[in-house]
Structures are given as C-alpha cells and as structure tokens.
Image (spheres, rainbow, N blue to C red):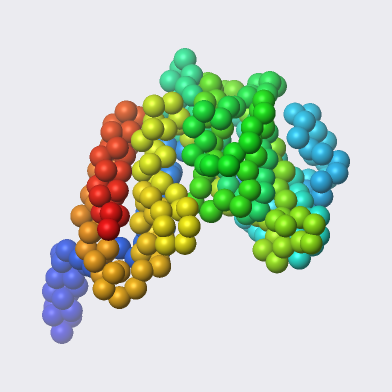
Amino acid sequence: MRCFLFIVLLTLLASPPDAEAQTADEVTKLIQRLVELDSIDLAKDVKFRAGLEPPLYMLDADESAMKVLRDPYEVQGQNKPGAAGWYRVSFTVPEKLGKFAIPKGGYNLGVESNVLGSWEIYTYNNGKPAGAAMATGATRVWNQGNVLATSNQHAAVWMSNAPLPTKAGDKITVAILATAVPLGRGSPEGFALRHLRLRFALAHTGARIPFYGNVSAPGVGTGLHGARELLATRKGEELKALQEKLKGPLSRMDALFDAAETGQLDALTKAMQKASKEISEALKK
C-alpha cells in the first residue's frame, strides 16, 4: 500500500502543471513577483500622520508626531469631511534594485506611487528637490518643481517621477499628502496608500510601462494589468476565449525571470518588450 501511494505521489509530481488558463488572482500573484525584479518596496518603512496641518512636505519637516504603520496600506479617513494625511519615508539608495545593480556612475530611477483618493508627492535627493514628469505612466497629472499630483486613478496606474538621477548611497526623502475624494463631504472609501516603489527608469521605462499597462475603465485595460482586469470581468464563452488567447503569453513569463538572472537590465527590458507585444495581441478582440 505504501509503495502504491509513493508511486501515485511521484506520478503527480512528474505531471505537467494544469493547462487551464490563468485567473485574475494568479495574474495578481505574477505581477507581485515580477515587480520585485527591478524595483524595491518603500511602503514598508513609511510613516503616517493624519491631518493636513502642519504641512509635512518640507525636507526637514518635524516627524515627531508620525508613526510607522503596521499596515502601510490601511484605509484612513473614511466618511470624514476634510480627511487628509501625510506619508513620509527616508532611505539610502541600495546598491541593487531587485536583481540589478545600480551602475557606479548612477542611473535614472523613478519613485512610483498610487493612492486611493487624491495625492501629491514631493521628492528630495541628497537634500535637494528632485524628480520630474517626463514619463509618469499616468494621465491627468499636474506637476511643478519636485511635486506631482493626480486624483482618482485606478490602483493599476503607477505614477512615476522619473527621471530621477540617482547613485547608490544617495539619501532620498519622499513626502505624500493624501486626501479623500470628495474632500468636502467626505468619502466612504477614505484614502490609502496603495503602491510606493523605487524602480529603474530611462530606456527601461519604455518597456516597463506598456508591459504592466493600466486599467482605464471597468473591463478595459492594457498589459498585464489589463489582462487581469479582463479575466476578472469577462464571463462565459468570452472568458474562455480570452483565457485561450492568454495561455501562450502567460506561459512564457519565465523568460522575464530568466532575463533577470543575467543581471543585465537590458535583457529584462527586451524580454518585457517581447512579452508586451504578445499580451497586446492577445487582448485584441
């Protein structure tokens, strides 16, 4: 009997993975793994303080009333008129982001952010205002100097302040003012930090933004985020047809992880470009 069970177990382990198409939840997990390849999470060390006043956008703002949240993504200010809060994080840029070393001469990076509600983000590098808005990855963005602001973006829209010329060892401070929408009467949703990462930009941005894509409306999107949105919203035969079209592109995502193992960012950039074309073709009606 034990021998029989052992043989059955070996058979199961040797069998190919389920050939069924990916689900929205599985694509979510895939995205969570992929973003670790070329970026680092900043949210885990973020500090928070409720309230607009006193403002905390300055580099040397007093953080004594702030606290590190156990859950940085915790929703704040639900059903409260005038709900607002400040998030801040300061860090030293490491030698590597994900699988890739930052060149000794530096590289253009970007701080990606997304907040439920409205948000404006201020960035400082080595004590000076920093960041720009050349390729934000979002629409309806307002910027002036080192501040970018936007509102009511889908969670899949990652606004970036690239290009941010950066070297390992640089000291970066990020301050975010988040407010509920509408502000006057309050919102049952409140506001919440949803995404905050430091990632590679420059030429890599041209591949990364379309690869992840975004969601512009319910059931409408591009890239991996669009694939997840469509998998979550389509039903019946439409869903089955989409799953069949996505099966090939999603099964070849190992190529991105293999590219990352080379330690050459350009290899990942090219892998993202190729994957983007395949996903885009699969999402066409």
Q: Position of residue 191 (x, y in %)?
A: 68, 56
Q: Nearer the viewer, residue 189 or 172?
A: 189
- Residue sitting at the far bottom: 1
The image quarter in which residue 184 lies:
bottom right
Q: Left or right of 149: which side holds 102?
A: left
280 left or right of 124? left
* Quadrant of the image occupied by residue 203: top left
Q: Between residues 113 and 172, which one lies in front from this camera angle? A: 113
The image quadrant that residue 77 belongs to is bottom right
Quarter of the N terminus within the rendering: bottom left
Is residue 98 something one can see in this rendering?
Answer: no
Q: Position of residue 147 (x, y in %)?
A: 67, 32
With 147 as the anchor, is 35 left or right in this view? left
* Residue shown at 55% from the left, 25% from the top: 164
Instruction: Please give the name of the residue rendered at 48% of the width and 57% of the height, measured from the top-left corner.
Output: 217
Which residue is the extreme one toward the top?
Answer: 105
**Does residue 152 appear in this view?**
yes
Q: Position of residue 115 (x, y in %)?
A: 62, 50
Q: Position of residue 213 (x, y in %)?
A: 41, 46
Q: Is residue 283 above or below residue 209?
A: below
Q: Is residue 242 above or below residue 130?
A: below
Which quadrant is the C terminus positioned in? Answer: bottom left
Residue 128 drawn above or below residue 248: above
Give 270 or 44, whichever is nearer the viewer. Answer: 270
The answer to whether 228 appears left or right of 252 in the picture is right
At 79% from the left and 62% from the top, the residue drawn is 185
Residue situated in front as seen by the camera: 271 or 93: 271
| Count of numbered tags | 0
Q: Residue at x 63, y 43 (%)?
A: 150
